[in-house]
Image (cartoon, helix red, strand yellow):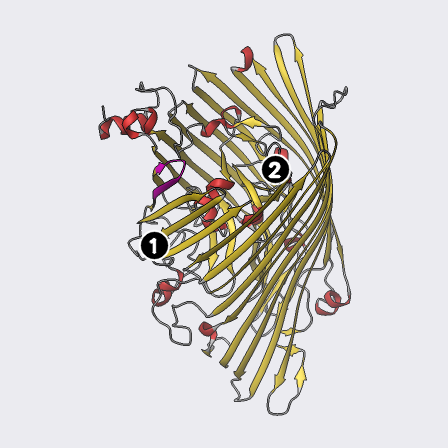
Amino acid sequence: MRPNPLFLALCLALPGTAFAEPAAAPGASADTAEFDRVVVTATRTERALVDVPNTVDVIERERMDDLIVRDLKDLFRYEPGITVTGSFGRFGIGDIRIRGLGGNRVRILLDGIPVPDAFSIGSFSNANRNFVDLDTLKRVEVVRGPSSSLYGSDALGGVVSFVSKDPSDYLEAGRDAHFGFKLGAESDWDGLFAGATAAFGGERWSGLVTVNHRQGQETENQGDDDSVGAARTAPNPQDRDGRSVLSKLVFAPSADQRLRLTVEGNEDRADTDVLTSYGFQERTGATNTRVLADDHQTRARVALAHEVDMLEAGFADALDWQVYRQDSETTQDTLEERVTADGVPERRQRSFNFDQRVYGLQANFVKGFATGGVQHDLAWGLDLARTETRQKRDGRATNLVTGRTTNMMLPDVFPVRDFPLSETTTAALYVQDEIAFADGAFRLVPALRVDRYELKPEVDGIFAEDNPGVDVVGLTATEILPKLGTVWSFGGDWSLFGGYARGFRAPPYSDVNVSLINFMFGYTVVPNPDLQPEISDGFEAGIRFAGEAVYAGLTGYHNRYDDFIESFQFVGINDQGLQVFQSQNVADARIYGVELKAGVDLGALAPGWQGWSLRGAASWSRGEDRTEDVPLDSVDPLTATIGVVYDTDAWGAELAGRFAAGRDRVSDPALYHSGGYGVLDLYAHWNFAPGTRLNVGVFNLADRKYWSAGDLPMAVVAAGVLDRYTAPGRNVAVSLAVAF
């Protein structure tokens, strides 16, 4: 008997409905065991999602391949409540926002190591955090909400944990070698990508090498003004190129322990003809005749890790530790040819550089024991890191008539540093106890972390010359961060969860000691040695159902943020008549909302629906700046996704929808109220030979014009150029993977 649509809707909304068939259909593509997935990030121990007192999203490698994921926007396309920002022009992908909070307030990890900071100051000086090649990953875990009790500063909004591939992911039992390659193309940026992976293994030694290359042009939008100048809405012409390598060598002296050496690197470059910056410039009176941009970023890491599964020592049953070094650098060069307001032809060359080097040590221990009828799983560890950060802007102006070159390019005399060389040291100790009562039916999870943060600035000749008489200051801060979570399993497949978590973010080096003077435009930015850490208090509660045919989870949350640091806040006029700006603790905010995730295997409800399944998710949230009594623009309107899936062993297809309500709450009436939209995407895969898989995706089937959340800048947007920020129209992606 075929179920009617009303019955199916009730099954999705009310998971307690009786089912025709209790067993899940083989080959069903919707993962009805969604909450049985094992995650690590939420508690630092391996736990099924159903036993975790947090909202956690997990995206496995197979799902990334099905969605032909190339960048962060692809990765989180169907995760309402997680937004990836973008910018028009040259910068591309920006940052990850979780529940309306982004930037350096979200902790991004790769194999437990923090991804480098973001930093931006002025035009063409923007270092983002897009340093990870997603093709090197086997899994992504996202913990929504404050997570500082386990991950310290910068986990104010949540944690995104990338986990890279291991040799064991390719070497099945009895197999000692693997080779595979992947080829693909995407029409929205004329992109081509290729990668190859080789793995080997023996009784003690195993290894892995993965190399990837990608190249393409500018990402298309639906702007149709391809003129030269400020009115242009079509993308600026761009050439993009990138590559990555991941290598691992694993030595297993016994079945219970592993030593792992990881060497990894990633590089991206974009060359842009910035046609939108051609023509008359109102602020300077000059007329630009040529503007070329060259953006380059690199990241490299070396890590040595050791894991012991069966230690059986008094202080721990299992442990893992790693030492690492990571180097990253962003360089942005700009060539500008123009005619000044005085009619002099001139060439300007500018360079922005931001680099970080970090050394770290992490150690985690797990100990299980019982007290009476209560089981304890105690996790504790330490996290030490020292980060060296430097930033510099340089430039030269050349008179094309006389050939005279100068480093004086008002308002700057280059080179300049906008903050001194900075060394930050963090030392943390955390402890967490997962306490199970009634044979695990009720779990109480208290956690506590003590974080010590220290900033040491160093004034070199460049900073001293550009900022005479400016006193820089060091900073120390210690925070105690508690967390308490609970999970109660009842009625077989049902569970309730909830908890409280405190988060914090230490005052950044760039806000504490930032300093610059701009006499040309009449302002100065001064340091603030009195900045306090940003603090959050987060509450979360939800209910889950994890059946054999249906899964569903509903979460409500309320986060209060105090002492937000606002960079470059206007504080008055100084004795020289300059406007004075300073980073200050000025903002208190509140973000609250509801999130839903559900799926149903229709084949388990009725045999005639074998292979069919549904999945969906939705997020509604509200954000308020309580200081200014205005909405938070970073909080998205209601968003939702739904997928209709058919899957067999040989092939499958999915029709996926993305939906968003119109933006009706903005902080300034001049901001654009983007409209709601619904977009359909179609995916298919075909395993047409052993070890061979073809994936195809068609996006925005109806070729609809819309603005994705995160792509419109948080500023007043002139109505005439709104189409600059539109998402691509109908586009296609294809990939072919072959493994031996």
Residue at the spot 69% in from the left edge and 71% down from the top edge: 415
Question: From the viewer's perspective, is residue 11 above or below residue 437?
Answer: below
Residue 640 in view here = no
Count residues near mark 2 (Cα–Cα under 10 Å), then give few for <14, some for 14-19, many for 20+. some
Q: Which of 493 and 334 is in front in this view?
A: 493
* Residue for badge 1: 673
Which element carries disc 2, helix, strand or loop? loop
Q: What residue type is labelled 2?
A: Leu
Residue at the spot 35% in from the left edge and 29% down from the top edge: 600
Q: In this view, does 357 lie to the left or right of 179?
A: right
Q: Nearer the viewer, residue 373 or 620?
A: 373
Q: Nearer the viewer, residue 720 or 10?
A: 10
Image quarter in which the C terminus is found: top right
Give the quadrant of residue 124: bottom right
Helix, strand or loop for the magenta stretch, by majority: strand
Sequence-first disc among 2 and 1: 2
In the image, which residues are magenta?
A: 646-658
Q: What residue type is labelled 1?
A: His
Residue at the spot 68% in from the left edge and 58% down from the top edge: 355
Question: From the viewer's perspective, is residue 624 above or below residue 438?
Answer: below
* Residue for badge 2: 171
Q: Does the magenta stretch include residue 652?
A: yes
Q: Where is residue 512 in the image (x, y as percent from the top left)?
A: 66, 53
Count residues near mark 1 (Cα–Cα under 10 Å), then give few for <14, some for 14-19, many for 20+. few
How many numbered circles are shown? 2
Question: From the viewer's perspective, is residue 229 above or below residue 120?
Answer: below
Q: Where is residue 228 in the image (x, y as percent from the top left)?
A: 41, 76
Q: Where is residue 650 in the image (x, y as percent from the top left)?
A: 40, 39
Which circle, 2 or 1, is nearer the viewer?
Answer: 2
Image quarter in which the N terminus is found: top left
**Residue 280, which numbered label?**
none
